């Protein structure tokens, strides 16, 4: 049932004079009549006796009374409607309450069913709201005892299972604690060994180790960072893809006449590593360093392709001479050689360690420049990758050494041949910025290689040959320059060349001219003449007015002296080489000769 409510009926007071205060009456009189000093008795009598004023006042009062009665009727009607609405709501709530009570007592009394409303009686079955009390049956003591025993057993099993679970959890916690202790101990040991370890900026839970070089290019700088993982036993391990990247090695192979004569494989055993993770990191660092070394060397090889340097996807070929070449490859480990030359093996080792030394030097030089210069401004594009000079210093040293060795071999061959012929030939070497043997010198690798060969000729005069190997790209290669005296035959006009064959021919030409000049100084008999157009021909006019032509030739390390008389077709020839002196002519072919070149020339001149 709804709670009690209050009903307010507005009350309209009866019309009549209103009581007002004296102040309000005075103000009203002032508004109607004006100030008091203007009010006189005659004025008041005139207004009172005026009939028109009374009619106006009565009409105003009638209009006011009619409007107030209409408003009162409207308010009463509105209040009546609200009262009827609330009375209907109260009636509905009372009927609902009576139906509920009737539904409860309808199972036991007809009075309850009769009190229901017809709609409720048709919708709800009789007895729906009845209640019934169920009595609890008593359980026997034997059953209760069995249930207690079963409950005790189940509780004991539950307690045992809980204790076993706690014991296993304790074991797992102990194992995990040992695993984590082992992990952090190895991590601390790795950091104490000097490996920088940090966290990822976007994920602080991931630890990474930096095994690359800080001065590498952007590509290799990012590849020098790897995440640290933990295996089931708590050991630090590296990801599997890192092991797949470390299968290639850098190797240097020496070919002589297309036959492998020496090889060096850049491998390190990392015996100083204390743990497996450190050994794996050292191996990964070495592999990354070799990869960067080969990539930078391949870039440089394209710049000097005109100097017999060929670059492929996994190898670089350097042509040192016609018979010797160097191959630098970055592939899977090649097979070991069964028979090789110790000198070529040392040469391959020299090339490998020279390349490594040059890359390390470039990294240090870049670090110094970056620490001394201001950082470049921020730019949206990537910074240009630096170009390293790795192959050029090594290639320049090897080519210079090869060219010098070839020239020295020619000079030594002539030295032996001239000694057999009774002439003296010596030389002195002065080298600048060149490697001696198989020893590396960083100061020499980074500068131009130059060697000065001073040859003392049989006549006592000197020939100076200077060999320079340049590193600059426009002038990269070996250049020969010579300085000699003005002989009687005159030197060649070409005193500077870049060909080994031209310089060898120039040396043989100067040597032959010097022998002719010496013969002119030694021979006193007869009339001697030398043709300018053929400087290697010596004409001897004998006492019998016969002319003998003597040819002096030098070639392939041999010195030859030939004699041809006018009117004769036979040519007599003596040759000196490393094996001795012997005749080459048709009549005395193969016969050994004991006299010297000067004695033979004197005997030929005396017989003319």
Image: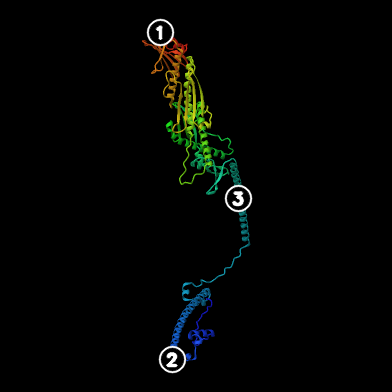
Q: Is residue 444 above or below residue 167?
A: above
Residue reaching furthest to the front: 37
Upstream in the sequence, badge 1 or badge 3?
A: 3
Q: Residue furthest top?
A: 544
In the displayed structure, 519 sits above or below 115; it is above
Rendered view: 423 above or below 158? above
Residue 169 bears which disc, if any? 3
Q: Earlier in the sequence, mark 1 or mark 2?
A: 2
**Viewer-nearest residue: 535 or 120:** 535
Q: Residues within 10 Å of mark 2 (few under 14, many from 20)?
A: few
Residue 58, percent from left and from top: 44, 88
- Mark 1 against mark 3, which lies toward the viewer? 1
User: In this orientation, which residue lies closer to the viewer: 117 or 175?
Assistant: 175
Answer few, some or many: residues within 10 Å of disc 1's Cα (few below 14, many 20 plus, some between 14 and 19): some
Q: Position of residue 226 (x, y in %)?
A: 53, 43
In front: 602, or 294?
A: 602
Q: CA distance from mark 2 to mark 3?
A: 117 Å
* Residue lying furthest left: 567
Q: Which mark is residue 543?
A: 1
User: SS at mark 1?
Assistant: loop
- The residue mark sitting in front, 1 or 2, is 1
Q: CA distance from mark 1 to mark 2?
A: 197 Å
């Amino acid at each position: 049932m709804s709670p009690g409510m209050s009903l307010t009926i507005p009350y309209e007071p009866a019309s009549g004079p209103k009581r007002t205060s004296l102040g309000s009456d005075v103000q009203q009189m002032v508004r109607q009549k004006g100030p008091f000093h203007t009010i006189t008795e005659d004025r008041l009598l005139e207004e009172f006796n005026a009939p028109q004023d009374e009619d106006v006042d009565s009409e105003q009062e009638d209009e006011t009374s009619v409007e107030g009665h209409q408003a009162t009727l409207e308010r009463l009607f509105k209040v009546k409607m609200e009262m009827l609405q609330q009375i209907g709501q109260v009636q509905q709530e009372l009927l609902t309450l009576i139906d509920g009570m009737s539904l409860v007592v309808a199972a036991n009394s007809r009075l309850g069913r009769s009190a229901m409303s017809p709609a409720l009686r048709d919708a709800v079955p009789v007895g729906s709201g009845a209640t019934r009390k169920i009595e609890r049956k008593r359980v026997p003591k034997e059953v209760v005892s069995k249930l207690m025993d079963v409950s005790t057993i189940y509780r004991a099993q539950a307690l045992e299972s809980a204790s076993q679970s706690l014991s296993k959890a304790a074991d797992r916690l102990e194992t995990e604690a040992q695993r984590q202790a082992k992990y952090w101990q190895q991590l601390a040991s790795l950091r104490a060994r000097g490996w920088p370890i940090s966290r990822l900026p976007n994920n602080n839970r991931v630890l990474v180790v930096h095994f690359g070089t800080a001065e590498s290019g952007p590509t290799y700088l990012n590849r020098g960072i790897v995440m640290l993982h933990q295996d089931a036993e708590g050991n630090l391990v590296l990801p599997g893809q890192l092991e797949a990247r470390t299968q290639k090695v850098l190797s240097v192979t020496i070919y002589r006449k297309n036959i492998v004569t020496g090889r060096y494989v850049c491998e390190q055993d990392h015996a100083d590593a204390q743990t497996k993770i450190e050994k794996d990191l050292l191996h990964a660092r070495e592999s990354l360093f070799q990869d960067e070394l080969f990539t930078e060397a391949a870039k440089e090889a394209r710049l000097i392709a005109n100097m017999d340097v060929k670059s492929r996807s996994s190898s670089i070929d350097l042509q040192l001479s016609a018979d010797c070449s160097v191959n630098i490859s970055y592939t899977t480990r090649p097979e070991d050689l069964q028979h090789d030359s110790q000198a070529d093996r040392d040469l391959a080792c020299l090339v490998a360690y020279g390349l490594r030394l040059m890359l390390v030097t470039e990294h240090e030089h870049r670090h110094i420049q970056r620490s001394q210069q201001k950082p470049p401004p921020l730019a949206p594009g990537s910074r240009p990758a630096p170009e390293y000079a790795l192959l050029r210093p090594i290639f320049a040293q090897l080519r210079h050494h090869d060219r010098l060795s070839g020239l020295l071999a020619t000079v030594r061959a002539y030295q032996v041949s001239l000694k057999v012929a009774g002439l003296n030939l010596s030389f002195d070497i002065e080298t600048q910025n060149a490697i001696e043997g198989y020893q590396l010198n960083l100061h020499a690798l980074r500068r131009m290689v130059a060697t000065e060969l001073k040859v003392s000729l049989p006549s006592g005069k000197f020939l100076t040959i200077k060999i320079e190997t340049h590193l600059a790209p426009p002038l990269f290669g070996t250049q020969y320059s010579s300085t000699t005296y003005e002989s009687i035959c005159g030197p060649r006009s070409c005193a500077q060349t870049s060909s080994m064959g031209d310089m060898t021919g120039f040396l043989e030409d100067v040597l032959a001219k010097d022998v002719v000049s010496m013969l002119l100084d030694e021979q006193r008999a007869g009339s001697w003449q030398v043709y300018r157009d053929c400087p290697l021909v010596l004409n001897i006019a004998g006492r019998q007015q016969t002319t003998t032509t003597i040819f002096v030739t030098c070639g392939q390390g041999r010195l030859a002296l030939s004699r041809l008389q006018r009117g004769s077709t036979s040519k007599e020839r003596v040759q000196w080489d490393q094996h001795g002196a012997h005749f080459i002519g048709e009549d005395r072919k193969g016969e050994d000769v004991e006299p010297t070149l000067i004695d033979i020339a004197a005997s030929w001149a005396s017989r003319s």
